[in-house]
Image: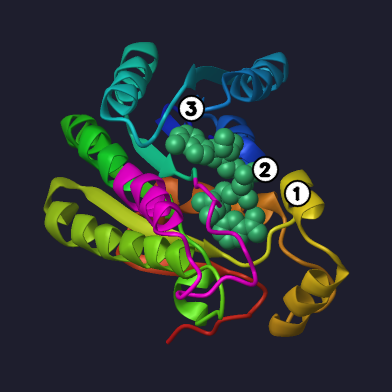
Amino acid sequence: MKRLDGKSILVAGGGGIGAELARRYAQEGAGVLLGDLDLDGARAVAGDIERAGGRARAIRLDGADEDSVAAAVALACETYGGLDGLHANFATFVDGGFDTGVLELPLADYDETMRVNARGYLLCTRHALPAIIARGGGSIVYTSSLAADAGEPCRVAYAMSKAAVHALMRHVAARYGRDGVRANCIAPGVTLHERVKSAVGPEFMEWALGIAHIKSRTGRPDDIASVGALLLSDEGSFITGQIISVDGGATMRP
Ligand SMILES: NC(=O)c1ccc[n+]([C@@H]2O[C@H](COP(=O)([O-])OP(=O)(O)OC[C@H]3O[C@@H](n4cnc5c(N)ncnc54)[C@H](O)[C@@H]3O)[C@@H](O)[C@H]2O)c1
């Protein structure tokens, strides 16, 4: 038996980490629906999974649009007979300037960050929850960030949006635990893949290795997928309401 055999999982947001989530969950036996604004990218990942013998489909998803989220949940249910898990993973990085503080942050960037990263995860939750409850319970995983707790001098809107997701996660865990629903956040540290590599320079990499206690490397998408697979599986059935850092020890959450 693989850990996610027979489970149906919606991965909302592909990209560097999301592609690896979809691959890992399919390798573990799940039927995966991968949704992303970038349909071609999501289709490419689903195609790779199917060629490797897994079960995956792709859909164009705007996680900040209610109709689009509803359509993704409906397709996952129709394709795999229900929904056992949601991994909300997409994010906007419009508030990405390392030299921008709260005084300089354009309000439009703040609004967009909260609309996608916080409101979008709320929409995904509202549509996935009834389907998961109808299945008799399941698991929701949210991708947060080290930024939510690190107290960085930049990316204030991004950090606020991820802190909001922590509150959403705790609410879901508290209110729907009796329905068999678990909810947790994974808070990655610097996790290298093509987009990150192209966006940062050597100074950033030095900073990333400096704040972590594992110095031999930065994070990889499969580090996040390993924890996601545990949280979505029955092996994680007594874990709920948690923020699990996968950051080489950069944060040491009490
Ligand atoms: N890579 C890191 O170092 C790092 C660190 C901490 C947290 N994270 C978090 O990990 C998650 C994945 O990030 P990543 O590094 O893979 O980034 P990425 O840019 O590679 O992937 C993000 C994906 O989200 C999609 N997306 C954006 N807006 C969307 C929307 N409205 N609806 C649907 N899809 C949308 C993009 O098209 C993209 O494919 C994010 O939540 C991010 O905040 C990443």
Whether residue 124 appears in magenta in the rendering, the answer is no
* Secondary structure found at label 2: helix
Would you name the residue on which mark 1 appears? 193
241 or 74, nearer to the observer: 74
244 or 58, nearer to the observer: 58
Q: In the rendered structure, which disc, 3 or 2, sits on the residue that comes first in sequence?
A: 2
Q: From the top left corner, tell me how far across and down residue 16 is, in percent.
A: 67, 43
Please state which amino acid type lies under the numbered disc 1.
Answer: His
- 169 above or below 90? below
* Secondary structure found at label 1: loop
- Residue 62 is drawn in which quadrant? top left
Give the left or right position of residue 133, taking residue 81 as reference: left
Please state which amino acid type lies under the numbered disc 2.
Answer: Gly
Would you say the beta carbon of the disc 3 residue lies within 8 angstroms of ligand 1?
Answer: yes
Q: CA distance from mark 1 to mark 2?
A: 6 Å
- 104 above or below 19? below
Q: Residue at x 78, y 60 (%)?
A: 200
Please state which amino acid type lies under the numbered disc 3.
Answer: Gly
Q: From the top left corner, tell me how far across and down residue 213 is, in percent.
A: 72, 84
Res 35 label: 3
* Secondary structure found at label 3: strand
Would you say the beta carbon of the disc 2 residue lies within 8 angstroms of ligand 1?
Answer: yes
Would you say the beta carbon of the disc 1 residue lies within 8 angstroms of ligand 1?
Answer: yes
Exactly how many numbered labels are in the figure?
A: 3
Specify few, some or many for label 1: CA neighbours under 10 Å numbering under 14, 14-19, or 20 or more: some
Q: For the magenta stretch, what is the residue range?
A: 91-120
